[in-house]
Amino acid sequence: MSGHSKWHSIKHKKAAVDAKRGKLFTRVIKEIQVAARHGGGDPDSNPRLRTAIAAAKAANMPKDTMERAIKKGTGELEGESFEEITYEGYGPGGVAIFLEVTTDNRNRTAGEIRSLFSKNGAKLGEPGSVAYMFSKRGMLLVEGGDEDTVMEAALEGGADDVREEDEAFMIFTEPDALEDVRAALSAAGLTITDAEVQYIPSTTVRVEGKDAERLMRLLGLLEDHDDVTRLSANFDIDDALMEQLSA
């Protein structure tokens, strides 16, 4: 989930979901298949597939599971036919929500997403209603290291921006450059604790009280949905309240 101004608060909530290993495997397998279908099965020439494989390795996915997913994506093995769909809308407090799903049943997923929105004080919008508020970016988190080393390695790898926050460094890239930047940071001996492609909001909306509670409940339910692969919302919540709601 992307939206709150503090990376660690974002990751605190996301970690609770990613800890469900089976769901994480399902999402990564879908991403590998879709990446292979659109860009081919060779990660050297398919940046999206390289990123998906890196996520699979980080989740300790067995090599043969990754290889089967690639072959299903390229058509060498039979498998489900997945399609990517985006949904947009507004949540409690007027927060813009943008999510990307990967599904083998468009009608089922649409009904489930619509139900989650309507039951939690949110409303789906038309395509384009909030998409303009977000940009698709690669994001990496480096903990440790000095600013000069991180900056030099990140820029050498092709990063666009480096920001220091909470004794760590947030690095932003074009989606296709994420793996090149990861490689440059690793070569410099830096510790990368997270790397992913996300939708970054251009502005944020402050939410408090009941709106914050309802919003976090909705975002948690959406993150738990097996078909949701990326979720972003342009919210900002007080750190103490964020930790309380994420507990």
Image (spheres, rainbow, N blue to C red):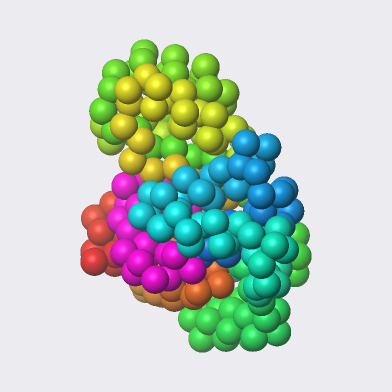
Please tell me which residue is depicted at 54% across the width and 29% down the height of the picture: 180
Please tell me which residue is depicted at 63% across the width and 80% down the height of the picture: 109
Q: Position of residue 36 (x, y in %)?
A: 67, 54
Is 65 above or below relative to 122?
Answer: above
Can residue 245 be seen in the rendering of this structure? yes
Is 122 above or below relative to 31?
Answer: below
Is 179 above or below relative to 210?
Answer: above
Determine the image quadrant of residue 143. top left
Please tell me which residue is depicted at 53% across the width and 81% down the height of the picture: 116
Q: Nearer the viewer, residue 110 or 6?
A: 110
Report the quarter where the C terminus lies: bottom left
184 to the left or right of 32: left
Q: What predominant SS class does the magenta segment belong to?
A: helix
Q: Nearer the viewer, residue 109 or 92?
A: 109
Q: Nearer the viewer, residue 14 or 181?
A: 181
155 to the left or right of 33: left
Q: Position of residue 150 (x, y in %)?
A: 38, 21
Count of picture labels: 0
Q: What range is drawn magenta here?
A: 1-26
Please tell me which residue is depicted at 51% across the width and 49% down the height of the picture: 53
Q: Position of residue 35 (x, y in %)?
A: 65, 53
Q: Position of residue 126 (x, y in %)?
A: 75, 69
Is 180 above or below relative to 148?
Answer: below
Residue 20 on the magenta span:
yes
Determine the image quadrant of residue 105. bottom right
Can residue 233 be seen in the rendering of this structure? no
Residue 218 on the magenta span:
no
